[in-house]
Image (cartoon, rainbow, N blue to C red):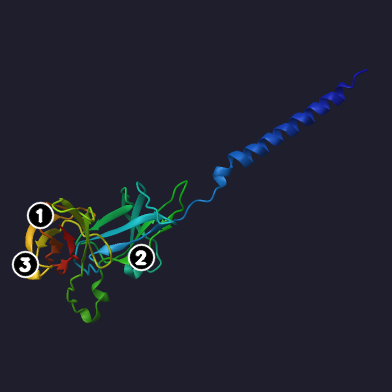
């Protein structure tokens, strides 16, 4: 007589163990992605101008990267604010933006914005950890100014980066003069007029003549095209300065 009860018991344990093994394999294999460590992220932050005081409009700029320095584009960032008197209180949401292809972001704060400390936050996603920037000061309260004396406005010292392409042009070859206008804190300076100048006498300041005028884009970049000549020329780019910034002149590049 067959032991059908024993067969049923064997079948029950066989299928139970099989199902448990399948669940184990799925958890170890399929769950590996879920359990993987997220990459770290980093946010730089600066104000432009560097010290907006208590009445200047300004921007908050920076770059979002991963822990290896690779830029993270198309990522949502939020700007948060807290009053200087609130210490470690809760920050409030101000605005949201998305990083561009270079990982850069920018927030604008108007002239009438209150005294505040500011930070930028990335909430993170499936691949990257969230991160909060360091804190920068926006407008300052009148009480923070010693003796209620209005401080003298000190102009920021900008810098002009200049590049020539191709780097070793042949005689008479047209070249491209490109670069960036940046503040003392490294933040790009947008919408400023810069002048490309040329001299054929070893870069003597009095001999430079204007070749062209351009305005920096939102990331502080400019671009000039210079036609090739019959003699060696020294090229520089100049920013005349304004109410916020001192004059700046780039290094000189030599073209044929």
Report x, y in % for residue 254.
17, 61
> Residue at 67% across / 39% down in the picture?
24
Disc 3 packing (10 Å; few <14; some 14–19; many ≥20): few
Mark 3 or mark 2: name the one nearer the start of the chain. 2
Measured Cα–Cα span from mark 2 to mark 1:
51 Å
Mark 2 or mark 1: name the one nearer the start of the chain. 2
| Viewer-side residue, 230 vs 55 | 230
Report x, y in % for residue 71.
37, 52
| Disc ID at residue 229 | 1
Disc number lying in front (3 or 1): 1
The residue indicated by pointer 2 is: 135
> Residue at 17% across / 73% down in the picture?
153
| Disc ID at residue 207 | 3
> Residue at 39% across / 61% down in the picture?
90
Which image quadrant for residue 162? bottom left
Mark 3 or mark 1: name the one nearer the start of the chain. 3
Which image quadrant for residue 47? bottom left
């Amino acid at each position: 007589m067959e032991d059908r009860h024993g067969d049923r018991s064997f079948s029950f344990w066989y299928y139970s163990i099989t199902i448990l093994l399948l669940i184990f394999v799925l958890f170890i294999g399929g769950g590996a992605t879920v359990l993987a460590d997220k990459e770290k992220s980093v946010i730089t932050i600066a104000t432009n101008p560097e010290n907006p005081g208590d009445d200047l409009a300004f921007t908050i700029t920076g770059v979002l990267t991963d822990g290896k320095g690779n830029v993270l584009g198309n990522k949502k960032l939020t700007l948060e604010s807290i009053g200087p008197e609130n210490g470690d209180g809760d920050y409030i949401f101000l605005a949201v933006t998305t990083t561009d292809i270079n990982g850069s972001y920018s927030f604008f704060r108007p002239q009438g914005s209150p005294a505040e400390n500011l930070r930028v936050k990335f909430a993170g996603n499936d691949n990257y950890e969230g991160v909060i920037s360091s804190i920068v000061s926006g407008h300052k309260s009148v009480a923070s100014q010693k003796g209620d004396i209005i401080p003298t406005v000190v102009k920021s010292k900008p810098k002009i980066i200049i590049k020539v392409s191709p780097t070793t042009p042949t005689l008479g070859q047209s070249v491209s003069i490109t670069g960036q206008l940046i503040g003392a804190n490294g933040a790009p300076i947008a919408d400023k007029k810069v002048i490309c100048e040329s001299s054929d006498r070893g870069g003597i300041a009095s001999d430079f003549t204007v070749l062209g005028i351009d305005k920096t884009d939102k990331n502080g970049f400019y671009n000039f095209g210079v036609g090739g000549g019959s003699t060696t020329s020294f090229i520089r780019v100049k920013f005349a300065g304004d109410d916020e910034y001192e004059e700046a002149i780039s290094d000189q590049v030599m073209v044929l």
